[in-house]
Image (cartoon, rainbow, N blue to C red):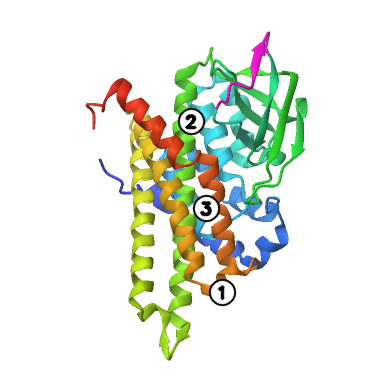
Amino acid sequence: MDFTPTEEQEAARELAARILGDLATHERLAAAGTGTDAALWKALCAAGLPGAVEDVGLLGLVLLLEEQGRVTAQVPLAATGVYGILAVARHGTREQRARLLPGLREGTAVATGAFPATGAVTAHDGRLTGTVGWVPWLRDAAHVLVPDRDRALWLVRTGDAAVEDVELTAPWAAGRLVLDGAPAERLGDGSGPEAYEDVLAAARTAFAGLQAGVCAGSLARAVAHTSVREQFGRPLATRQAVQLRAADAHMDTESIRVTAYEAAWRSDAGLDAAEAALTAAWWASEAGRRVVHSGQHLHGGTGADLDHPVHRHFLWGRQIDAYLGHGTELLAELGDLLAKGGRHEDR
């Protein structure tokens, strides 16, 4: 097991960090409101970063999403990466890859996914019916990957469905997906539960990587604040209680990061990643919630300011927690998976 980034992965991460650091400022993000920062997304696409996902793999995508999370940049990189580029590249037919991937690579088309499956969508003769309460970045998407109640995967053009605006805790340009006999295209040659599980594991891993960045950014802001904010003539950072709270947040952040790296590495290596992805998602949910609360609390009264940058990390951290399914649900699913199959020998 080796999490050392390749030259290509490290180059992509450094490029993303530079672009995001320059453009994803608090002022720009505040001006973007609840939608995507179109200019920032255009800059990332012009640099070829979405298109690089095929080459750098899921681990490379996790590294890119860490950088996005550090600054809470409002771009649909996670959704397009896992539900579009990786899903089509791994499970699409040759014709689907040739037709869909160029637009996704260039960023002229955005994809998202109505995951996880809830059993609310039925398929009949290539048409889907059902409602999904909210889908991230749906308002930006040209296609949405939809699992039906049998966990077959379908591609639906958003123009063939009804999309209603939904505002979340985080500004993810989300929408409510209403399918009323919408025409759909089966992903691949009869994709079934196996493809669904692969995409779901990749999504959990990717959003765990995003949470690692959100937590790292929150903690960095807290450290900077407590290092200059004084109480009784001494910086807050010299207080043992502050140091211990920050240390716990650091360990939690590293736990999210390393479990996301393991899940991504296993996926890229062609190994079963379901358990690792659930583990990463659990850490991202449980520990992520602790870290963003700590980041806000360590700012004291300043952390209660809804316009302060640290509050964005708090909102994103709680949204990712909700999107992943909350820690208790994930732990129960992981327990069921271990009980059914035990631990895999290839660990």
Q: Pointer 2: residues within 10 angstroms few (<14), some, or many (20+)? A: many
Q: Which residue is mark 3?
A: 317
Dot placed on the residue nearer the N-terminal end, 2 or 1:
2
Nearest the camera: 268 or 277?
277
Q: Which residue is mark 1?
A: 301
Along the horizontal axis of the image, is 62 left or right of 135? left
Where is residue 301 drawn, in percent x and y?
A: 56, 74
| Residue found at the very far top of the displayed protein | 125
The N terminus - image quarter: top left
Mark 2: secondary structure: helix
Mark 3: secondary structure: helix
Dot placed on the residue nearer the N-terminal end, 2 or 3:
2
Query: Which marked residue is nearer to the observer: mark 2 or mark 1?
Result: 1
* Residue type (three-letter) at the residue carrying disc 2: Leu
Where is residue 149 drawn, in percent x and y?
A: 58, 18
* Residue type (three-letter) at the residue carrying disc 3: Gly
Task: Please indicate, yes or no, whether residue 51 appears anywhere in the rendered image.
Answer: yes
